Amino acid sequence: MDILKQEVDQLYQTLYTQKLSELNTLHQSDDNEQKAQKFAIKEAALQLFIKLPTTDKNIIWANIYRAHVARKSGIDISPETIEKVKSADQSWIKSSGHAFEEMVKDLANKALSSEGINIHLQRDLSVLLHEGKIKNEGRDMQFIKTNMDSSAFDLFAEKEGYVFGFIQAKTSIRDRVTRDREPSLAAMGHFLWSIVFVLDGDFLRLPKFMNMVRGGTDMFPQNGWHGLYAFSLPDSVICDRIYKLDPNLDNFKQHAVQAFSEWKERRQWFDNNWKAKQEVRTP
C-alpha cells in the first residue's frame, strides 16, 4: 500500500505542477489552481484505473484524495483521519453555534436585567406562545411564527409580553451574510427591531460587507440591519450601525431600551431608517 501511495503522490503532483505551469504560461490567471487540481485528480484517476485494473478503485481514489489534501494543507494524513477531522469539525460547527446563541442570550439578559427586556431563544419563545403570553397580534404574530419555522432568527427581544426585536447570532457570518440579510430586511419592513451579533467582525474590513450592513451604496441602498454588534472588531470599522461590544454590553443595552420605546410609541416610524442615539463609544 505504501508503494501505491508513493506512486499516486508522485503522479498527482506531477500532473498538477505541469497543468498549473501550462495555465500560468497562457496567462489564464482565473482559478488556475482549481483548474490544475481538478485536472490532476481526473487524469491521475484515469491513468491509475487503467494501469492498476485489479486494485480496488475506491483505494486508488482515496489515495488521490490524500495526495490532494497533503498538497493543499501541507499535512499528510490518511483518508480515515481526514473523515474523523471533518466529522469533528461539523460537530463543532453545530454545537458551537448553539452555544454562541445561548451565550449571547445570557450576556444580553444580564445587561438588560434592570430594564424589563428579555431575550429569548426560539424554544423559549415557543413556550411563551403556547402559553398565550405573547400579546402581538395580526401581522406580527404571523411574522413571528413564520420566522420561527424558518429558523431565520436565533433570538427574540420581548418586553411586557410584546416581541419587538429579531436577533441573529453568528460565530461566522461572512459566507452567509447575504442569506442572513434578507430576513432582516423583512423584519425591518414589518417595523420590528432587527440586529445581529457576530463573534468576529474582521470581515467588515471589506467594503462589500460593511455596505451590506450600513447601506447607502448603489448595490446596497438600504441598511441590512438596524445594528451589528461584534465581540471583536477592528477599530477602523467601528462606525454608524457597526458597534464593538464593551464587556457589559452597555451600548447594546442603551439601544435595546431605545428600540422598545420607539417601537411602542412611534412604531409607524420604526422602519429600517431608525437608528439608536447616544451611542456608547468603545475603545
Image (cartoon, rainbow, N blue to C red):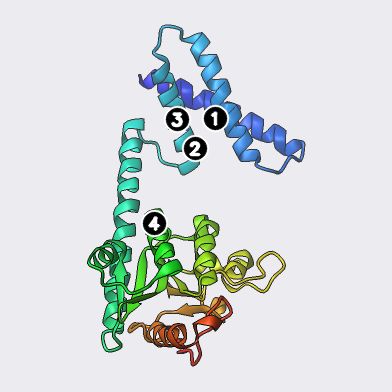
> Depth-wise, is mark 3 or mark 2 nearer the camera?
3
Label 1 with label 2: CB-CB less than 8 Å: yes
Label 4 with label 3: CB-CB less than 8 Å: no
Secondary structure state at the residue bearing disc 3: helix
Q: Which residue is mark 3?
A: 65
How far apart, in angstroms, are the residues tagged by discs 2 and 4? Answer: 38 Å
Q: Residue at x 51, y 55 (%)?
A: 175
Residue 54 appears left or right of 210: left
- Crowd around label 3: few <14 · some 14–19 · many ≥20 (10 Å): some
Q: How far across and how far down the image is residue 264, in percent?
A: 43, 84
How far apart, in angstroms, are the residues tagged by discs 4 and 1? Answer: 44 Å
How far apart, in angstroms, are the residues tagged by discs 4 and 3? Answer: 35 Å
Q: Which residue is mark 4?
A: 151
Secondary structure state at the residue bearing disc 2: helix
How far apart, in angstroms, are the residues tagged by discs 3 and 1? Answer: 12 Å
How far apart, in angstroms, are the residues tagged by discs 1 and 2? Answer: 8 Å
Secondary structure state at the residue bearing disc 4: loop
> Depth-wise, is mark 3 or mark 1 nearer the camera?
3
Residue 259 shows in this picture? yes
Q: Quadrant of the N terminus?
A: top left
Q: Residue at x 41, y 41 (%)?
A: 75
Secondary structure state at the residue bearing disc 1: helix
Q: Work out whether mark 4 precedes mark 1 in sequence or the reverse, and give the earlier one.
A: 1
Q: Which residue is mark 1?
A: 13
Q: Which residue is mark 2?
A: 71
Q: Work out whether mark 4 precedes mark 3 in sequence or the reverse, and give the earlier one.
A: 3
Amino acid bearing label 3: Tyr
| Residue 122 vertical position relative to residue 237 in the rendered view, above or below | above
How far apart, in angstroms, are the residues tagged by discs 3 and 2? Answer: 10 Å
- Crowd around label 1: few <14 · some 14–19 · many ≥20 (10 Å): some
